[in-house]
Amino acid sequence: MLTGSAEKHLKKTFGNRVRFNEPMSRHTTIRIGGPADAVVYPEGIEELKALLKWADAENIPAGVFGDGTNLLVRDGGIRGIVILLSKGFRDISEPCEDGGFFMITAGAGARLAALCRAALKHSLKGLNYAVGIPGTIGGAVAMNAGTKTGETADVIDAVQVVFAGKEPEWIGRNDLNFSYRKLSWEETGEKPVIVQARFRLEKGDVNRLQSEADALISARKSSQPTTRPNAGCFFKNPANEKPAGLLIERAGLKGAESGGAMISEKHANFIVNTGNANASDVLDLMEKARREVKKRFNVQLETEVIITGEEA
Ligand code: EPU
């Protein structure tokens, strides 16, 4: 819980851009999650810097969330401040040529889909792996979002970040520690806020890029439950094993339900909210899928979805 004086400070600084006790179900695509003490929308880098510095000094946990597309917030919600980057963090630049590549810079709060459209408009190749992936640029970088055809790390030139109390800095691709669905900050010991990313693209053929994108979108629509609230692929595909969705299906779990949550009948690596699921329903199915897959195939599934927040 925030103290009265912390609430007062936030209210005074952010006016109607702070909401207290805000249900995270409004900020996750699976539409689940207990309340955050505060959700704050800083407008631009100066406000963000000041907010991080203040929260750090007050010992209030503060973290940036994207569109919550790969996120499960437990039913007790989040203590501290959820920062959402929208106005002031959504710009997508025109391409600029550099060393044979074409660079586009995008704000962390911009949508990955908008970046894909911008690249296509300029006949730039490299981003089709991301076509159909929901969420923000910040989220895509933080999670190294990807598909079978590529991942964010492949096209990143540099990322601009802010560490609490410091000035924004650019970190080049060679100094970023990307791995499967992860950007790790172990070496810095502190996780900064990603504010912008520069993408390194190449000239391509617009018709070819467009038809490739169309095919990827329709493959996604036919194999994934895109019209029901979900958090994306729930588990990582285990290395050197069959994909998680196939293992869960073979364990006989398609359509399994717990409260308002269900293992998708369309794709077994998705858990969908059929209406009024809470986080504990989803966690119940997650455990069940893990248990059955371990029992039948001796494979330990690891979650791709980030699970955060307190229990109810
Ligand atoms: N399969 C089943 N049953 C299922 C689901 C899948 O048998 O219920 C089989 C499919 O028939 C196929 C194999 O499993 O032979 C792989 O399935 P799919 O082609 O759907 O791909 P995936 O490995 O499940 C990955 C990414 C997705 C991404 C797709 C398309 C992971 C964990 N998943 O899914 O990413 O959209 O490829 O490129 O890397 C995400 O990361 O949130 C995500 C959805």
Image: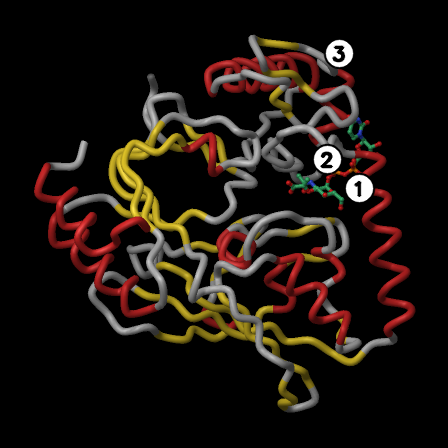
Dot 1 falls on a residue whose secondary structure is helix
Crowding near the residue tagged with mark 3, few <14, some 14–19, many ≥20 C-alpha atoms within 10 Å:
some
Q: Residue 161, relative to residue 178: is it above or below?
A: below
In which quadrant is the N terminus drawn?
Answer: top left
> Between disc 2 and disc 1, whose residue precedes?
1
State the CA–CA distance, disc 3 to disc 1.
22 Å
**Which residue is at 85% across, 66% downward?**
209
Give the colour scheme of this rendering: secondary structure
Q: Which mark is residue 252?
A: 3
Sooner in the amino-acid sequence: mark 2 or mark 3: 2
Amino acid type for the residue under numbered disc 1 = Arg
Amino acid under label 2? Thr
Q: Which residue is mark 1?
A: 220
Q: Are marks 2 and 1 in contact (CB under 8 Å)?
A: yes
Q: What residue does disc 2 label?
A: 226
Q: Quadrant of residue 273?
A: top right
x and y percentages locating residue 84 in the rendered image: 40, 51
Q: Is residue 201 above or below residue 112?
A: below
